[in-house]
Amino acid sequence: MDFATIIGIAMAVSAIGGAYYLEGGTVGSIFLFAPMMIVFGGTIGATVVTTSMQTVRRVPDFLRLAFFAHEYDAYATIDTIVRLAEKARKEGILGLESNLKTTTDPFLRKGLQLVIDGSEINDLKEILETEIANSESRHRRGIIFFQKAGGFAPTMGILGTVLGLINTLSNTSDAALMAQAIAGAFIATLWGVGVANLFFLPIADKLRLRHDDEVAHRELILEGIMAIQSGDNPRNIRMRLLSFVHPSMHRASDRRA
């Protein structure tokens, strides 16, 4: 579970809700069905128009990725690749076949299989780069979906407010009731702006971060697999792969090396 996502959203909502309560506001005045229906229904409907049903069906997967994504350990991956390189030099490429069943990372396992099958290095690179490109395409659909929703939501909120004002000004003659109705009409704008900036857009940015992390992880694996295929020295492989890790994150032993 990604506590940064949960804590961040909770802090933002609590700060806004707490300030509203301190100013004398009540929860019941915010949770009005009509404004919420316009904002959520209109936003989702407009967003669905811009994409495909395949992407819509994957929205739960995108949310799961935002809240429960796997954290990549670059050092653990580097250590694994170096151990595989050492074994390949001692036992040959075919000696890596016993490691296929114990390799949990599907991308690394696919790379190992290609090496064991004797794929040419150019073919291996092309296949794995295509795999990365396909994953980028899938991730981009989720990012764009929530970006679109974040763009439509404020507009739907304004639309709901305008509809509320039209209804209020055309049917209310009492000044006190009119003031109350106008205040209620602006609830749609509140929901539109709020849900866009507290949920849709942050989720889009979180998905982009997940995407960047996965691409960096796979590029590290790709470099390592190609080095194993080329028969490079394990020590040189480690030094090369450490270039994928920010210098400030290097372990003390690696800095001395």
Image (cartoon, rainbow, N blue to C red):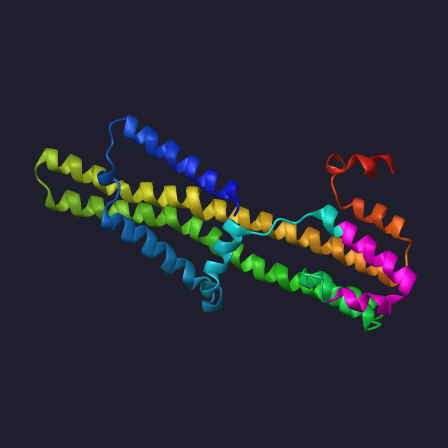
Q: Position of residue 96 (x, y in %)?
A: 82, 65
Residue 212 is covered by the magenta coloring: no
134 vs 231, nearest the viewer: 231
Residue at horizontal 59%, vertical 50%? 210
222 vs 102, nearest the viewer: 102
Q: Position of residue 109 (x, y in %)?
A: 72, 64
Tell me if residue 228 comes above or below residue 97 in the rendering: above
Left/right placement of residue 215 relative to residue 155 reads: right
Prevailing SS of the magenta stretch: helix
Q: Position of residue 9 (x, y in %)?
A: 44, 40
Tell me if residue 236 comes above or below residue 111 in the rendering: above
Q: Quadrant of residue 175?
A: top left
163 vs 230, nearest the viewer: 230
Tell me if residue 250 comes above or below residue 216 in the rendering: above
Q: Quadrant of residue 100?
A: bottom right
Residue at horizontal 78%, vertical 50%? 79
Looking at this view, name the residue that lies furthest to the bottom. Answer: 117
Q: Position of residue 87 (x, y in %)?
A: 86, 60
Q: Which segment did they paint magenta? A: 78-100
